Amino acid sequence: MKSVSLTAYPRTLSRRNGVRKLRTSGRVPAVIYGRQTQPQSLEVTITDLDHLIHHSASENILVDLVVKDDTRPSRLALVQEVQHHVLSGKVLHVDFHEVSETEKVTITVPVESTGEAVGVKSGGGVLEHVLFKVKVRALPKDLPELLTVDVSKLEIGQAIHIGDLAAPAGVEILGDKHITVLAVAAPVTEAEEAAATAAAATPGEVEVIKEKKDETGEGAAAPAKAGDKTTDKGAEKPADKGAEKKAEKKK
């Protein structure tokens, strides 16, 4: 991977208001860190950063970072992360990961296909891109920006796995060698397509919830109506004492 020169400046404003002023002045906050260095807050000109990102072939960018007033002439670093505004898409912050020219690093690179598969061209098959990125390990200068795979010889039912990928010189491709990267599938018939459409249109089953019964298995008792007689013995009216005395006199 070819490195690109980029100039950065030590950051003097770090609080929220300071960051706003920084972005208003045409710069964005950044930070550089590494295994053998302490994190350092920086700022980068927006125009330089936009030019760097838009002219890169992939998201992996290797830079020779020149920090103003630094004791070292330049620092080799990978653009680790770029934060964008959700709505405007403007760059908000950049992370640089400092690396050594003599130490291998691991990154994730995109996989792109080239050519037209035979199974697609003559058999009506469908090219399926299963794995879009793979991990590679190499020295910073040997890192590829992306991996290109020729699929022109693929027939229907054939696939290219991680173990089939051709690694550039000095690069090790990591991962399970049996994982599929690209494959050519048989064309979908009209009957299969119709069946899939019908299955998608079929409404799901609706669960019917029945009325809950009480513990004895009977339904809930209906509320008593006005005028109904009660069967509760405790609710019977007491006998009239005057009527009892009259009955005794008659005797």
Image (cartoon, rainbow, N blue to C red):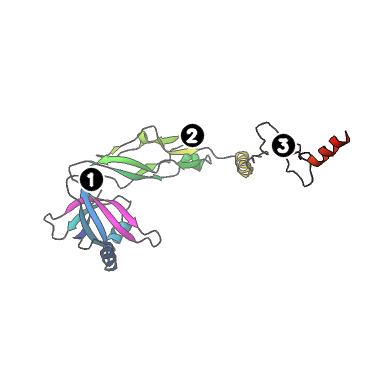
User: What amino acid does circle 2 point to?
Assistant: Gly
Position of 119 with respect to 34 (left or right) is right
Q: Earlier in the sequence, mark 3 or mark 2?
A: 2
Q: Position of residue 206 (x, y in %)?
A: 64, 41
Q: Position of residue 189 (x, y in %)?
A: 59, 39
In three-dimensional space, the C-alpha distance between marks 2 and 1, rounded to whole angstroms, equals 37 Å
Element type where label 1 sits in the image: helix
Asked whether residue 250 appears in the rendered view, the answer is yes
Q: Which residue is mark 3?
A: 234
User: What amino acid does circle 3 point to?
Assistant: Gly
Q: Nearer the viewer, residue 113 or 62?
A: 62
Using a 10 Å C-alpha cutoff, classify the residue at mark 1 as few (fewer than 14 neighbours), some (14 to 19) or many (20 or more).
many
Q: Which residues are magenta?
A: 69-96
Q: Residue at x 18, y 49 (%)?
A: 38
In three-dimensional space, the C-alpha distance between marks 3 and 1, rounded to whole angstroms, equals 96 Å
Position of 241 with respect to 14 (left or right) is right
Q: Residue at x 29, y 57 (%)?
A: 93
Relative height, residue 56 to residue 103 (above, below):
below
Element type where label 2 sits in the image: loop
Q: Nearer the viewer, residue 58 or 126?
A: 58
Residue extending farthest to the right is: 250
Element type where label 3 sits in the image: helix
Q: Earlier in the sequence, mark 2 or mark 1?
A: 1
Query: Does 75 lie within the magenta span?
Result: yes
